[in-house]
Image (cartoon, coloured by chain):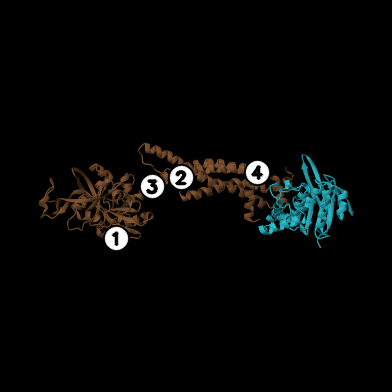
């Protein structure tokens, strides 16, 4: 059976000014189906870059990314957008909600791109918001919500098209520790004992080891440590 | 992504920046208004010129005369307008010897496809007497079918002949005012006496010999003076008849049958006078009326093929039409300048909007929006701006046109010129204006939309 994510000698280089930056420099890793993996590393270690490559938001300089048996290398721009739409759900540190839309509209937007008819997507948006504990906050705009609430909306949106894998990039970075715990518990619940794979990027080792089954540590674009927790 | 959803997203984006949307749409409106204003002005001018011909009913008629017999037609090149004209309207074949405009020819014309009716143009030179006033003019025979057509659409007073056998006449307003000071309504019903020369038989010719005329013309033809009283049935605004040539000099119009009965229809034609009297009578000109103005050309050609000379006003106006198309084109180009500026406004607005919404575009792409989805959202936004601008521009153009029209007509009236409509907005201009606004905005929006769709999602997500 295919792994959820499989990378082979993955590299991403870019130039900043005159200097060549090796954001990723030959990363080979494997995330099993249903696994909850923590990606650890300081800022600039390449963990976000790795996540973006798995999400299909970026293309590698060298090496390959295979997500659920599908090599992203050969995909067109349109197929990559399909991959983002159907296979992965992204959660960001800064939430990335559209400020002019209500919570429900933000969640429904993801389904709009998938061509889900209006009635069905409104219903599912409502259900998802209830699932993440925001039953009474449907009509609120991001500004009217607390950080934790915004992140819940963002998680509901990530779930909208029922993806195989959740990619969370420092989801607790902007939250106080109590709220951070709530969000992590939510992610654990969504992992649901192996129903959905989760990759959590964080710089907080204790946080990662508490909820992830396995942690991978990156430094300067290379894997330097792996640990089962 | 469904089109309705894309449109909905575009609409909400426009709502989020109401001021900018309204200002940009206003720019488009001004462009469309100036375009529509210019073209509607051109259309109105054209309507003034061509329309007056159209209303005169001359467009659906072909005037036929006997072929010119002016020697061989070869070598006509460089020999002036007369020959060119002859070649244009003259018979397309060598005229057969019997190409005479007699009753048989009339029947042949009537048999041509799409011909409504055929009638001879009979003009009788008359001396009209009304009270103490005398005037030499011509009475023209008008077929009953002319009721409600051409100049007979508008009467200053009275109405068209009741029937063909009535001794009634219609006169032009000009003519009436020359004859008497009475009001038009008072003239109707009074009597006009027409004196005319007619062919008589030699027996009673002596009774009313014309002064200065030999008692007997060659060929046994005699001419006598006759007089007849006609009741003035109506006064038309302009003088006229069914035939464009006759219109110019005929102030009195009488039923065609009456003109025929006057029996003098050929005194104007030396050809006819010189013909042996045993010949069947023929007419100098015949009017062929066709069902629709478009058919004139074809009917004209068929008549020429029969060996006659035929021409219509449509021939003359063909060149005018080209001039009007050029005028419309020129006015349209001038009007388009504002629209071009407005389209740059759209580009500017869209580019600004993309800059502002870069992060939003990044988010949309991260959660599965494709390049095409993003492109469409922006394209539809531009189209909606164009649509709003187009609709409002038409209203604006119409309103400004009405305003100018009102002012101009006020001035015209003070100058004693009758008021006219200086701006006409036909339905094709409405549809064309909106379509054009839509097209221009789509073209203007295509570049920004393409840029938005090509944004790198990672860069866009980092954007503040």
B267 displayed left or right of B78: left
Residue B254 is situated, as x and y percent measured from the top left of the image, at 24, 52
3D distance between C-alphas at marks 2 and 4: 35 Å
Say which label, 3 or 1, has the lower sequence index.
Answer: 3
The answer to whether marks 4 and 3 sit on the same chain is: yes
Which residue is labeled 4 in the image? Answer: B353
How would you rate the neighbour count of disc 1 (Cα within 10 Å): few for under 14, some for 14-19, many for 20 or more?
few
Please state which of the two labelled residues, at mark 3 or mark 2, is closer to the viewer. Answer: 2
| B63 to the left or right of A217 | left
Spatial separation of the CA atoms under disc 4 and disc 3? 49 Å
Q: Which mark is residue B50?
A: 3
Q: B22 and B96: which one is in front? A: B22
Badge 3 element: helix
Tell me which chain the residue with mark 2 is part of: B
The residue beneath circle 2 is B40
Chain B, chosen colour in render:
brown
Q: Earlier in the sequence, mark 4 or mark 3?
A: 3
Please, which chain is the residue tagged with disc 1 on? B
Residue at horizontal 37 percent and vertical 36 percent from the top: B414
Sequence-first disc among 2 and 4: 2
């Amino acid at each position: 059976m295919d792994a959820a994510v499989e990378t082979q000698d993955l590299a991403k280089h870019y130039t900043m000014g005159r200097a060549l930056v090796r954001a990723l420099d030959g990363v080979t890793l494997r995330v099993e189906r249903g696994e909850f993996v923590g990606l650890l590393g300081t800022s600039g270690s390449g963990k976000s870059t790795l996540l973006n490559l798995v999400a299909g938001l970026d293309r590698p300089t060298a090496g390959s990314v295979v997500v659920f048996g599908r090599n992203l290398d050969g995909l067109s721009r349109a197929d990559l957008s399909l991959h983002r739409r159907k296979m992965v759900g992204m959660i960001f540190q800064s939430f990335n909600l559209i400020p002019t839309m209500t919570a429900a509209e933000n969640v429904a937007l993801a389904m709009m791109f998938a061509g889900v008819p209006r009635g069905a997507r409104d219903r599912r948006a409502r259900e998802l918001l209830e699932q993440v504990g925001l039953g009474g906050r449907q009509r609120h705009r991001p500004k009217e919500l607390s950080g934790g609430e915004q992140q819940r909306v963002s998680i509901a949106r990530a779930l909208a098209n029922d993806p195989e894998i959740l990619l969370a990039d420092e989801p607790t970075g902007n939250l106080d520790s109590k709220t951070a715990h709530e969000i992590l518990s939510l992610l654990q619940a969504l992992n649901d004992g192996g129903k959905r794979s989760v990759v959590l990027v964080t710089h907080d080792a204790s946080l990662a080891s508490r909820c992830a089954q396995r942690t991978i540590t990156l430094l300067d674009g290379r894997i330097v440590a792996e640990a089962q927790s | 992504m469904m089109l309705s959803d894309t449109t909905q997203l575009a609409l909400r984006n426009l709502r989020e920046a109401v001021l900018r949307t309204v200002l940009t749409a206003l720019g488009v409106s001004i462009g469309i208004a100036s375009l529509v204003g210019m073209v509607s002005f051109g259309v109105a001018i054209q309507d003034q010129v061509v329309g007056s011909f159209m209303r005169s009913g001359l467009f659906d008629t072909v005037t036929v005369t006997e072929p010119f017999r002016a020697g061989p037609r070869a070598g006509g090149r460089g020999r002036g307008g007369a020959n060119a004209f002859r070649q244009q309207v003259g018979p397309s074949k060598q005229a057969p010897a019997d190409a005479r405009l007699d009753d048989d020819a009339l029947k042949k014309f009537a048999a041509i496809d799409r011909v409504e009716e055929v009638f001879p143009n009979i003009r009788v030179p008359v001396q009209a007497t009304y009270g103490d006033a005398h005037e030499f003019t011509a009475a023209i025979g008008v077929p009953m079918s002319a009721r409600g057509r051409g100049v007979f659409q508008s009467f200053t007073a009275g109405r068209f002949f009741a029937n063909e056998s009535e001794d009634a006449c219609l006169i032009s307003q000009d003519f009436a005012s020359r004859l008497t000071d009475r009001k038009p309504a008072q003239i109707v019903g009074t009597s006009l006496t027409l004196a005319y020369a007619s062919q008589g038989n030699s027996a009673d010719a002596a009774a009313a010999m014309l002064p200065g005329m030999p008692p007997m013309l060659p060929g046994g033809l005699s001419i006598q003076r006759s007089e007849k009283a006609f009741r003035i049935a109506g006064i038309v605004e302009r003088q006229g008849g069914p035939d464009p040539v006759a219109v110019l000099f005929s102030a009195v119009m009488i039923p065609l049958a009456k003109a025929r009965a006057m029996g003098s229809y050929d005194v104007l034609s030396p050809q006819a006078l010189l013909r042996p009297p045993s010949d069947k009578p023929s007419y100098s000109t015949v009017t062929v009326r066709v069902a629709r103005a478009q058919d004139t050309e074809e009917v004209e050609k068929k008549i020429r093929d029969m060996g006659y000379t035929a021409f219509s006003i449509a021939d003359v106006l063909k060149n005018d039409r080209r001039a009007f198309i050029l005028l419309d084109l020129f006015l349209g180009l001038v009007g388009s300048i504002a629209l071009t500026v407005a389209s740059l406004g759209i580009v500017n607005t869209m580019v600004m909007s993309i800059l502002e919404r870069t992060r939003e575009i990044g988010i949309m792409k991260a959660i599965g929006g494709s390049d095409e989805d993003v492109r469409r959202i922006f394209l539809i936004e531009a189209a909606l701006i164009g649509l709003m601008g187009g609709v409002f521009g038409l209203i604006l153009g119409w309103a400004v046109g009405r305003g100018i029209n009102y002012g101009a007509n006020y001035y015209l009236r003070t100058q004693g010129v009758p008021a006219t409509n200086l701006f006409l907005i036909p339905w094709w201009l409405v549809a064309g204006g909106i379509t054009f606004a839509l097209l221009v905005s789509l073209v203007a929006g295509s570049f920004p939309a393409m840029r938005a769709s090509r944004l790198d999602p990672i860069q866009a997500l980092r954007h503040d």
